[in-house]
Image (tube, rainbow, N blue to C red):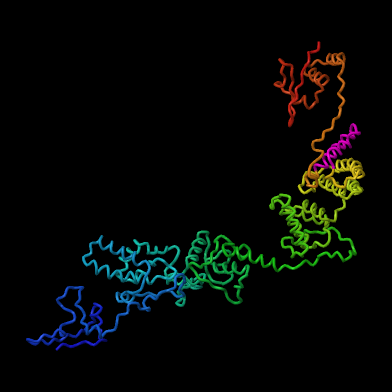
Amino acid sequence: MAVRLGEDDPWVWGELHDEPLPPGRPRQLVLDIEGLALPEARPVRMPQGKPGRRKAVPSWLRARLPEPVLDDPRICPAQVPGQMGLFPTPARQFARTHAARIGDRRIPDFEAVSEQLRKMADERGVRARTMWIWRLEGFARLALAARDPDQHQVANEALKDLLANGPILGQALERAALLAPPPSHRVVAPRGTGPTRQSGQRDPELRGQCAHCLAWANDRRVLCAPCAHWCCEVRKRGGIEAECSRCHRTLMAIGGLCRMCRIILAETEVDTAQVAMEGGDQLWFARPHAAGLAVGRHLPGTAPLQGRFVHKRRRARALAKAARRLSEHLLDPAQLELFPVPLRDWTRLDTTTPPALTTAATGLLDDFTAYMRGRGWDPAAFSGSIRILRIVTGHLGAAVPIRESDVRALASLRGSLQGARVINYLCLRSLLEPQPPSDARIARAQHYASTLSQPAFAAAVHTFIDVLLGQGSNPSRARSPKTIENYTRAIVEPIEAWITDGLTDPREITKKHIEDTLEPLRGDRARRLHTSLRSLFRALKRERLVFRDPARSLSLTSSRPVPTALPSDRVAGLLDRLDDPRERLMVALVAIYALLPGQLVHLQRTDLDRSKGRLRLRRPGRIDHVVYLGPVLP
């Protein structure tokens, strides 16, 4: 009779899974009785069967054995995509039995590799095509299932775990675009061949950690890619290994600092995340989470601001701005001044970080910004004016009128600060303490404006004086103090007459009022008043204090005396005394046609048209003047 094998027998397991049987297999005994058929006594594996094919397993044997495991979680356990493993995968060897134990698992990208294996079988003309593809598909499932969770392609060094099937599967994976390119020897070095810490010997405890920056990479490399690139760039720049002044390790360094210390200093320069520790350093993960750092920059003082470093510095500025305190020198209107304050020296004050603003100062700054925008000006054009008002109100407040001398002193510090618009705005809001004029003519002009009985006209004349001084909302070239005094003195009398007639605002003045004022005047007095009034209303129109300029289209008719010509006999007697024809020509042009010496110098031969008797006089910036020549004297 035949000997039955137990369900835990290793030989039975090999028969079920069509695997090589272990050595020392006992022979199966069969009892053959003539005339009696014993089907259960036949051998499980028929020796005359073809290789690769097996007899159907008897039902009694399959019932005694447990169901095969189709998805063993111990074989290449599934990982969460996007996460990074903490420990590097050790060297391993895959067998065909491992592929059978994950046969029921869905593995991404397996169909693409299987298709490439079928194409390769057709191209090579494999005889046992089904068996060849079935065996390689199992190893392909293992290679794809063993990928790191943060990697889409199979690492090139993982093909060594597939033993003899690695080269063939490498071709299939490469054709399916699922094989990662081999690492560059310049960037990374295989584990066990690079320097470590302070000595040249390998540290057996350094697994998955970069030897330079100590970042955890979960790979089999000594140096992470950024540190290897750092070393190459430093070596190109002529750098050598030196002791780091911070961690005292002998590594590639720039400015006395290694790459890790430079990153830590950059991270903790603005320590908004509180990562700076006493007696230790904060480490990080490598690869996709590695810290970026420029090679050619030096620390401390010139930290490379890249990526998160820029956001950290902005956040630090925002926190510092929120933590500002009010100034200790705010002026109180209820406090009397015991001693006159001299001219403040703003050069000794740090104006880059002014203190926090009070509620009144914030409202004043917002109103000034709205006022400038309402004038239609570009914000970039008055940023210097806003900066001056921010500094003054931050240190002195907005409860007391601001001295004009302080605004001018701040404007003189840097060319980017502008004080003319601030002075004009504060004057309109009655928040300016005017600076005493240093010129007597300007003082007399301001005195003329202050003597007007109507405040609206007095404010308009003061604005007119500021425009002439170049301190208007749109600064212009300043006029001489004498001209300012003459203009102001000329317009005070007619303005006072208009006030007597019942006018209360400069916008009520019309062209008829100006014509009636100029009508009784003649000569230089009329021209002086006409010029002064035109300049006044042109300035008020530019400052938008009047809607229209009533003196714009106003013209003044005046008679100019014509020079009396010399008698002919006197001219002839003068010409007879000159022998040089050129001198005689110049005397004739001056005495007869009243040419000026400057016009004679610029005369050219082409300016004379003898056929028509004309002489063209060139006047730069103006239309040329034509002189009609008369008959030549005898």
The quadrant the C terminus occupies is top right
Above or below: residue 404 compared with residue 37: above
The stretch of residues the image draws in magenta is: 509-538
Q: Position of residue 546 (x, y in %)?
A: 80, 45
- Which of the 4 quarters of the picture holds residue 256? bottom right
Q: Residue at x 35, y 67 (%)?
A: 110
Q: Position of residue 468 (x, y in %)?
A: 82, 44
Q: Nearer the viewer, residue 533 or 606?
A: 533
> Does 438 sit left or right of 66 as displayed?
right
Q: Nearer the viewer, residue 286 or 459?
A: 459
Above or below: residue 10 compared with residue 275: below
Total numbered labels placed on residues in the image: 0
Q: List the single residue furthest toward the top.
A: 634
> Does 498 sit left or right of 541 as displayed?
right
- The rendered magenta stretch, by its main secondary structure, is classed as helix
Q: Position of residue 295 (x, y in %)?
A: 54, 61
Q: Let me know if residue 24 is in the magenta part.
A: no
Q: Let me know if residue 531 is in the magenta part.
A: yes
Above or below: residue 599 compared with residue 383: above
The quadrant the N terminus occupies is bottom left
- Which of the 4 quarters of the picture holds residue 500? top right
- Which of the 4 quarters of the picture holds residue 541? top right
Q: Residue at x 70, y 69 (%)?
A: 323
Above or below: residue 584 compared with residue 350: above
Q: Nearer the viewer, residue 604 or 497?
A: 497
> Does 455 sit left or right of 106 as displayed?
right
